[in-house]
Amino acid sequence: MKREDFIQSSTRIRVLESKLLTKDQFNRMVEAKDMDEVLRVLNETAYANSFNKLERPEDYEEALGYEIKKLYRDVKEISPYPEIVEFASLKYDAHNFKVLFKDHILGRESDELLIDIGKIDINRIESKADAGDRKGIDRYYDNIATDIVSMFETTTDPQYVELVVDLHFYETMLKMANQTKSERFIKYAKDYIDFSNIKAIFRMKKQDKDLNFADAVLVEGGNISVNQLKAIYFEPIDSIVQKLKLKDIGKSLYKGFQAYEQTGRLSEFEKAMDDYQLNFMKDTKLISYGPEVILAYIFAKETEIKNIRIILVSKLNKLSPEFIRERLRDIYV
């Protein structure tokens, strides 16, 4: 990739960035008395067209789903290299794989959870899963179906389907990052692997899994090696966090650990990871042009949509502004 190839696309992305929601707009939505008031704020923004089409406020997922698809249509048209968008959309492939194979294993249908973004052909995967075809579903996930079935037969726990998919997902992410030769892409992938591995370690400890199980769910390639994590596996969680606090992700890891101690929810680590990665990408504001500008905008927009969803769900359930603020991710602007 030649950095100069991104001059025009970076200029267009900066225009889109100017339309991202501000802290003031988020504060107004958080403090809104109900969903209708939140929608009035959104109707003053670039989201107006999506939300104006809704018959009921409760159908907000239709609008948010449209916005995610629009985001990827826009950046595909803007980016001079498709690999940038493919890298960002890998997580949707992973999500769809989890949904489809959990459905296959549990004998259910959850088509409403599928997200039609990414390289994997959803219909093709679904037909192969229904036919019991375990191989060749996609070149990025060549052996994933076999691994999923093997894991399920060993654990009988559908939750571990997610860990198997994540293992393949992170390996592919790092491979694609290396192909871009962008230091920022590579660091993003390595940090993501570290967060995922630590989260997996905590889940294993919570469920009293044998250390040998680590080989099936931990991913090589991060800044913290699998052997390093296995060496501290039997230590208390707070001790593990202390030993890793000098790593790049250490501050965010500690923040996630503090929240985890209070709630017992591993989702707190996901929030810490989201905030770390977005703040890491904020430095691209100092880059005039390059692939990082496109990737940063994708993540900024996705985080914005995630925050809107958190607010709308909370308002629907009449939750307090304080509760909402605790769950909101950092924003890019």
Image (cartoon, grey):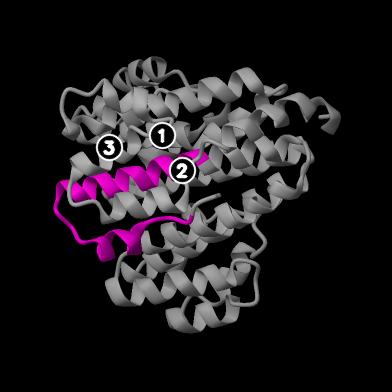
Lower position in the chain sequence, tag 3 or tag 2: 2
C-alpha span from label 2 to label 1? 8 Å
Residue at the disc numbered 1:
45
Q: Is residue 128 above or below residue 244?
A: above
Q: Which residue is mark 3?
A: 40
Secondary structure of the residue carrying tag 1 is: loop
**Residue shown at 65% from the left, 35% from the top:** 14
Residue 35 in magenta stretch: no
x, y percentage for residue 319? 18, 58
| Residue type at the position of mark 1 | Thr
**What range of the chain is rendered magenta?**
301-330
Residue toward you, 131 or 36: 36
Q: Residue at x 27, y 32 (%)?
A: 61
- 235 w.r.t. 108: above or below: below
Q: Which mark is residue 21?
A: 2
The verdict on residue 310 being magenta is yes
